[in-house]
Image (cartoon, rainbow, N blue to C red):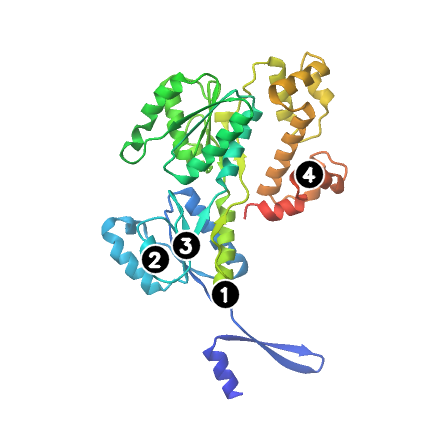
Amino acid sequence: MRTLLKRIKEYNYKVILVCDGFFFFTIIYPKMKRIRVAFVLDRTISYERDLIMGVVHYSDLFSTWDFFLPATDFWQPDKRKPLLIELRNWQPDCILMNDNQYVSEFKDWGIPLFVAPSKKLISGVINIIADDLKIGEIGARHFIDKGFMNLAFYGTNQIFWSRLRKERYKEMVISAGLHFYEFDALIKNNWYNNYLHLSEWIKDLPKPVAIMACHDDFGIHLIEAAKINGFRIPQDVAILGVDNDEFICKLYDPQMSSIDQDPVNIGFKIGECIKSLIVDGNKPPEFISGIDFHLVTRQSTDIFAVDDAQIIKALQFIKDNANSKPISVDAVVASTSISRRLLEIRFRKLLNRSILDEIKKVRIDSICGKLRSSNVPINEIAFKMGFNSVSTFSIYFKKDMKFTPLEYRKQFQTR
């Protein structure tokens, strides 16, 4: 017994006494290792801050880990050595970081390295990436569905994720038979002059025009350039960003629509991977990618670019009503002053979809938002949306989304 207790203490084993009838027996298993995770990220950037939140949330649910986050002044050049010394003494099991000046040094430490690259993929680490083709597709689809004929993209070919987003966006626009335009941003020392260069480009674009920026920070340039020229947003120039940094998107007037990459859930996946690597001893993946991207609409794209007053009335009626209750095609027609047949013809011609398609799109988008952002019971969502039963609701949702409502919530709900 003394030898057993010595080994329990030496190997940090946990002991539980279990009663089975009249007999007591002991189950011995090792305690979960307290994993030490270092964050060498910029806490002022919402995406990086949300990655941290996702990892911490995983730890709160499944284990208890220790975390290291450098103080802000460590980012000064003369603080490099103190940071490396302190971090080395702390002995992290893994590091989550951006592609800053420490990457090459940390790669030599022989521990898992998770990197969110800003310009190019990095070999020898686990890259945290986005499905950039999907992001470009979401942006293009948003503007195409609103009836825009002129679509543009603002980014830079010098950053891989910007280039990929543009390529898919451009492909979607051209495939739809619409007009595509692009502007390549000035970077490095000329970054803060972009809005002046954009001003001339925007002035020459046919109006109305819808412009997707590769990132929210680029979207700021578009808003400033449009205002310099006196263009109305979104009536003349509709603007869409990527990342949904609420501080940036809500700071400007009008507030900017943006595609949310859901970095908290990406951080949660990083937490799962950390546990898989360090506790279970599994092989590291080549990359970790987000899977749920959704568009948050604000004033900068809140417009229908259709030169048809009856279509606009119908779209507005659907937008105001279909997201909270069932509506019929006849009700949509009644909101206009033309016949059902003529309205259907105009929908097909201008929007390439039917009235019923638009109703379903708005309702599915509303359901997805409720499932992602709340804990409201699924049966309650179903009845509030006007469905007679949960099974009918589930069939309706799965036919379009390929998930049941419960599966969708488990997969994509904000952690």
Residue type, numbered disc 2 = Phe
User: Considering only order in the chain, which callout, 4 or 1, is on the residue closer to the N terminus?
Assistant: 1
| Image spot of residue 174 (x, y percent) | 52, 25
Residue 397's tag is 4
Cα distance between the residues tagged 3 and 4:
38 Å
**C-alpha gap between disc 3 and disc 2:** 10 Å
Residue density around tag 2, few if under 14, some if 14–19, many if 20 or more, within 10 Å: some
Q: Which badge, 3 or 1, comes first in the chain's sequence?
A: 3
If you read the primary sequence from the N terminus, does the residue marked by circle 3 or circle 2 appear first? 2
Q: From the viewer's side, name the closer residue of 331 and 176.
A: 176
Residue 106, numbered circle: 2
Disc 4 crowd rating (10 Å Cα; few below 14, some 14-19, many 20+) is: many
Name which of mark 1 and mark 2 comes first in the sequence: 2
Q: Measure how far apart labels 1 and 2 are at the Cα level.
A: 20 Å
Give the image location of residue 127, x and y in percent. 43, 50
Q: Quadrant of the N terminus?
A: bottom right
Mark whose residue sits in front, 3 or 4: 3
Secondary-structure class at tag 4: helix
Any part of residue 64 in sight: no
Are the two marked residues, 1 and 4, in contact with CB atoms closer than 8 angstroms?
no
* Label 1 sits on residue: 281
Precedes in sequence: disc 3 or disc 4: 3
Amino acid carrying mark 4 in the image: Phe
Please name whichever residue, 66 or 346, is drawn nearer the observer in this view of the structure: 346
Q: Along the horizontal axis of the image, is 391 left or right of 67?
A: right
Q: Which numbered disc covers residue 125?
A: 3
